[in-house]
Amino acid sequence: MAYFSARSTSIRSPKAGAAFNALKRDIMLGTLAPGTGLTELELAAHFQCSQGTVREALLQLQEEGLVRRRGHRGTQVSECTEDEAIEMFRLRQQIEGNGMARVMRARSRTLVKELDSLLDKMLLAAAAGDELELAAFDRDFHRRIFEDANLPALDPVLHRCLVHNHRFKISRSPMARDLEATALRHRSIIDAIESGDTGRATAAMRHHIATIVDLGPEVFPEATQ
């Protein structure tokens, strides 16, 4: 499964990567509920690996905000609250919305082609009914655009926001969503970037973020829901 792309994690050990992938999937789906304790010894036995390997996976999960490591109190699955989701959507508006002007001034020649490829992968995931796979390529899509803003120190912040937003969407979804429509929402961003119009590209990105989930008009009152 290609769910966790190379852009998503810096884990190098294959066994740690497998543990990370499995734990992340269970956290994103809510199989591991917020507050669930995670012990290195039990996880090492479950994944048939060393505690050091498990520790590497847990550290990466901590980097993405999915677990909290609290010293002698151990490691727990983090909370996924609406308040945090709202603030992370607002932070994305600042990072991605303001970053788009920088992207358009110095976008790479391969950007549109790579975004088209990621959209194709999102559509394949949608056809397979795999929302987690789609979300992973969605994160790669947004991070690939921001890469051309040349603000690398902000990429981990953006990635954490994306992970939390996707976790929130999946955990709070009352019913199955139209995954194909979710993927196709990215088409307008690609078209706007390809047009070379900075204002259009910025507006497309801001509108996309503002209308991802229905959290009420108080979050982005200027957007048309």
Image: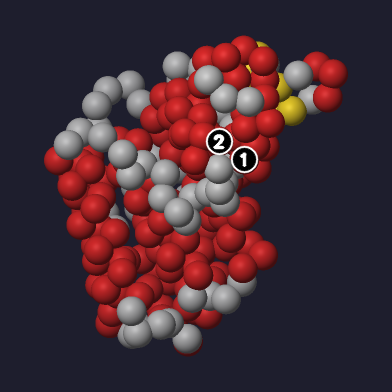
- Give the CA distance from mark 1 to mark 2: 9 Å
Instruction: Pick whichever, 101 or 220, lies toward us.
Output: 101
Q: Looking at the rendered structure, which numbered label has been put on residue 176?
A: none
Three-letter amino acid code at the position of disc 2: Ala
Write the residue at 52% across / 80% down: 102
Q: Quadrant of residue 78?
A: top right
Location of mark 1 (residue): 60
Instruction: Pick whichever, 45 or 171, lies toward us.
Output: 45
Write the residue at 61% across / 71% down: 151
The image quadrant where one finds the N terminus is top left
Where is residue 172 drawn, in percent x and y?
Answer: 42, 25
Three-letter amino acid code at the position of disc 1: Gln
Confirm or deny contact between disc 1 and disc 2 (CB under 8 A).
Answer: yes
Instruction: Pick whichever, 42 or 146, lies toward us.
Output: 42
Location of mark 2 (residue): 16
Write the residue at 42% across / 44% down: 4
Q: Quadrant of residue 132?
A: top left
Image vertical order of residue 6 relative to residue 83, above or below: below
Q: Is residue 129 left or right of residue 50?
A: left
